[in-house]
Amino acid sequence: MDPYLLMWGLLTFITVPGCQAELCDDDPPKITHATFKAVAYKEGTMLNCECKRGFRRIKSGSPYMLCTGNSSHSSWDNQCQCTSSAARNTTKQVTPQPEEQKERKTTEMQSQMQLADQVSLPGHCREPPPWENEATERIYHFVVGQTVYYQCVQGYRALHRGPAESVCKMTHGKTRWTQPQLICTGETEPSQFPDFRIQTEVAATMETFIFTTEYQVAVAGCVFLLISVLLLSGLTWQRRQRKNRRTI
């Protein structure tokens, strides 16, 4: 974590009214083939003002955005602004190329969709709006009590063993993140857990097969017994006919 941000966070904890939040020492745990996302951000959370390649933060701009507020409303203080690295003596924005405009439009649409899906929580800020020439990845500095949620990336499916979330907690004077109970496996890989539905279908098929086999054996036995009775009856009838002929 940036030493400047740590120092600023300590000063904020002491001087800013209503901001009694401890920064989490580490980032949320990483899960293979999974990403995490916060639905809302607790007051005291910081977001770095990062610019994409070829752009830099304006000299008079803030290096971060801060989630602040009161019991009734929370919002992000400061605004992130980026300018072209080539324009050293001016803060005039360079007109983005069509590809950049398309990328920014997509980012804005995604942000609007995220805002629409979010629920307002007391003491929390929503996802910050995108700024022009923003870096692809956002770097947050979370505070104690923050919850992030995990989901598998495209091409992988979740094998849930418990909550797919992690919470930053204070334990014995140190911050730590709880471990999310999530495993992501490839769509084509066999599951490590038994599929009880398949087992039930197999068991039912086996029972049907066993029943059918037993039925066939029983029918064959009956047929054999009937043939035996008919043969014995035929032999008995022939013997009686021979005796009658001798008597005559």
Image (cartoon, helix red, strand yellow):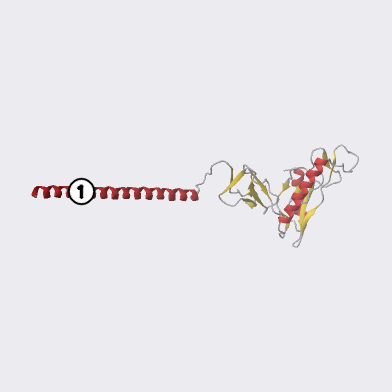
Q: Is residue 44 above or below residue 57?
A: below
Q: What residue is shown with label 1?
A: 234
Q: Can you give x and y, in whole percent of width and height, for residue 104 in the image? A: 79, 45
Q: Can you give x and y, in whole percent of width and height, for residue 239 in the image? A: 15, 48
| Residue nearest the observer in this picture, 47 or 93 | 93
| Residue nearest the observer in this picture, 17 or 200 | 200
Residue at the spot 18% in from the left edge and 47% down from the top edge: 235
Q: Is residue 83 above or below residue 14?
A: above
Total marks shown come to 1
Residue at the spot 36% in from the left edge and 47% down from the top edge: 213
Is 33 situated left or right of 134 in this image? left
Q: Can you give x and y, in whole percent of width and height, for residue 158 in the image? A: 59, 47
Dividing the picture into quarters, in which one does residue 72 lie? Answer: bottom right
| Residue with the most extreme bottom position | 72
Residue at the spot 47% in from the left edge and 50% down from the top edge: 201
| Residue with the most extreme left position | 247
Residue type, mark 1 in image: Gly
